[in-house]
């Protein structure tokens, strides 16, 4: 547990996990990404004379690395990524090898946004981005249920508008 203070708030690990569907989304997204690269390399192996074996080996290694990544990283990410919103602040925790805990006081929040790419839409998930005046950049809560994310954004907008401060 970190005993630093940021804006008078205690920096601590947040309590909430993202939605369990996020694991499936991250797994499918990784499998599709690596699969497309492996497929392209396999295609090159079939059509490039003299380098077919090299491209076939690269396709196999890419597929193997992708399978390992798709099995390990989404579960690890789910175990590590946490978030929490209180009346005073937004807390996030992220990172795999280098853990990062962040807190954004409500008075410092400038904007709150959602993002829903194709994989998010397929799994009915959203990402919420909380932008502050911090040099560290925005806080991102990745993998929330889409309806819950809409409610969270509405709540954050209401609370930040009612919170005195200049958000700088």
Image (cartoon, rainbow, N blue to C red):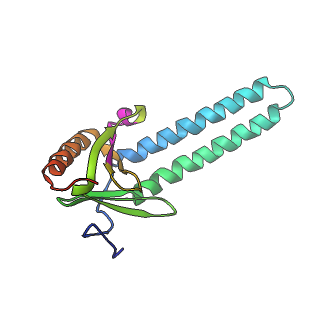
Q: Quadrant of the C terminus?
A: bottom left
Is residue 83 shown above or below 111? below
Res 102 → quadrant: bottom left
Residue 61 horizontal/vertical position (percent): 69, 44
Res 117 → quadrant: top left
Which residue appears at 65% of the width and 31% of the height?
A: 39
Which residue appears at 31% of the width and 57% of the height?
A: 83
Left or right: 86 as drawn, with respect to 31? left
Residue 131 horizontal/vertical position (percent): 32, 48
Which residue appears at 53% of the width and 46% of the height?
A: 70
The residue lying furthest to the top in this view is: 47
Is residue 44 shown above or below 125? above
Res 34 → quadrant: top right
Which residue appears at 26% of the width and 43% of the height?
A: 149
Q: Quadrant of the N terminus?
A: bottom left
Residue 1 visible in the shown view: no
The residue lying furthest to the right in this view is: 50
Is residue 121 located in the magenta-colored stretch of the structure?
A: yes
Residue 122 horizontal/vertical position (percent): 38, 32
Q: Nearer the viewer, residue 148 or 87?
A: 87
Q: Which residue range is magenta in the image? A: 120-130
Residue 45 horizontal/vertical position (percent): 76, 29
Left or right: 4 as drawn, with respect to 97? left
The residue lying furthest to the bottom in this view is: 3
Residue 111 visible in the shown view: yes
Is residue 50 located in the magenta-colored stretch of the structure?
A: no
């Amino acid at each position: 547990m970190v005993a630093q203070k940021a804006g008078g708030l205690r920096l601590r690990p947040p309590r909430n996990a993202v939605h369990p569907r996020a694991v499936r989304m991250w797994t499918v997204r990784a499998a599709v990404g690596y699969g497309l690269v492996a497929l392209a390399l396999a295609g090159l192996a079939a059509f490039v004379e003299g380098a077919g074996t090299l491209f076939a080996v690269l396709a196999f290694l890419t597929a193997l690395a992708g399978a390992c990544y798709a099995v390990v990283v989404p579960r690890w990410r789910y175990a590590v990524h946490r978030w929490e919103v209180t009346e005073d602040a937004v807390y996030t925790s992220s990172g795999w090898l280098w853990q990062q805990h962040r807190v954004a006081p409500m008075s410092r929040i400038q904007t709150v946004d959602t993002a829903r790419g194709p994989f998010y839409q397929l799994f009915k998930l959203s990402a919420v981005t909380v932008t502050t005046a911090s040099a560290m950049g925005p806080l991102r809560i990745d993998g929330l249920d889409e309806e819950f994310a809409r409610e969270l954004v509405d709540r954050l907008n209401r609370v930040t508008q009612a919170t005195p401060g200049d958000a700088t």
